[in-house]
Amino acid sequence: MLWRFWPPGGTGVDADAEPRAVTPRGNLAEEEKTTIAIFRQASPSVVHITTLAQRRDFFSLDVLQIPQGTGTGILWDQDGHIVTNFHVIQGADAAQVTLADHSTWKARLVGAYPDKDLAVLYVDAPKDQLRPIPIGTSADLQVGQKVFAIGNPFGLDQSLTTGVISALGREIESVTRRPIKDVIQTDAAINPGNSGGPLLDSAGRLIGLNAAIFSPSGTFAGVGFAIPVDEVNRLVPQLIRHGKVIRPGLGVQVAPDQLARDLGVKGVLILGIQPDSPAAKAGLRATRRGATGLIDVGDAIVAVDEHPVRSVKDLFAGIAQHGVGEKVGLTVLREGKQQQLEITLASIE
């Protein structure tokens, strides 16, 4: 012990110790320069969203607003519209937005579309403080492309992570349990608080809206998902114009998949039809109970635009590819025989 703590070579203390000379670094690598440039260009377009809940003080009975959660959003235009995920603001009584210059503004909900996990907020901030994010396209993405994610994970604002596109054409489930198709999978780190933030390509353009992670622990596990920008760019203008998405539909009520299987029906069984709806005008038949009490099975939709329909989810996905006023081809099974119909979709509440 004496040898270990008091070696004969001295104490190691040097009264003349000075900081070491800095080794010259040289120029940054081109890839590093690109990453820095992308972050500097995009970060002013990324905002920090804090959701608030109203609580009544036990002693004073005053109504207070307390922080409930945090998330990320992107500046869509210079009018003050901000795009984020619906689940970021779901259940909140109010929200406030912190811009890149650290100024904070009260936010107002303009519209939301839970089926695609999208929401639009509005802040009344000066135009010179609002820098809209550049918009790209998700139609020509390739697996292996480098991507960049900016967000506020765990409340740590303006955090940058990098990665690649791991896969395309993935499907995730929205808060309404409807499918969100053609989702981008990435290994760029996405954690709680990143939701609603941008996924960027190497040109600094928005290609997706970070929405979810796949993780047993609830934190980053190498699998993140982003809603493709082409879908965002199609739906956000409707939310700004109408406060909602004008959803195309047939005007039918359909049976749960299990009920259809129990009745031995392949495809999606029609239970009811709204009056004056596209389905009614096309002569589709609903399921009904006959005078004897037996069930008279109605039409079953087995394909949309020649794509097989095996579940209600398949039907929703097929209709969602069209807009109001567009025609859709249906293959209907009626009394054991298939019929081909062309129906013009209408706005369905």
Image: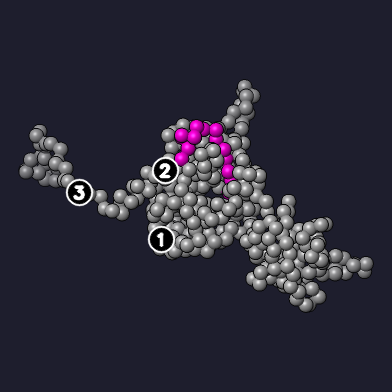
Contact, mark 2 vs mark 3 (Cβ under 8 Å): no
Question: Horizontally, is 73 left or right of 108 in the view?
Answer: left
Which residue is labeled 2 in the image? 43
Q: Amino acid at mark 2?
A: Ser
Q: Amino acid at mark 1?
A: Gln
Residue labelled with disc 1 = 145
Can I make out residue 254 in this image? yes
Looking at the rendered structure, the kind of residue marked 3 is: Gly
Q: Which residues are magenta?
A: 118-131
What residue would you read off at disc 3?
26
Q: Residues within 10 Å of mark 3 (few under 14, many from 20)?
A: few
The residue tagged with tag 2: helix, strand or loop?
helix
Question: Residue at horizontal 46%, vertical 35%?
Answer: 129
Q: Residues within 10 Å of mark 2 (few under 14, many from 20)?
A: many
User: Which residue is nearer to you in this view: 281 or 106?
Assistant: 281
Residue furthest bottom as drawn? 337
Give the mark count. 3
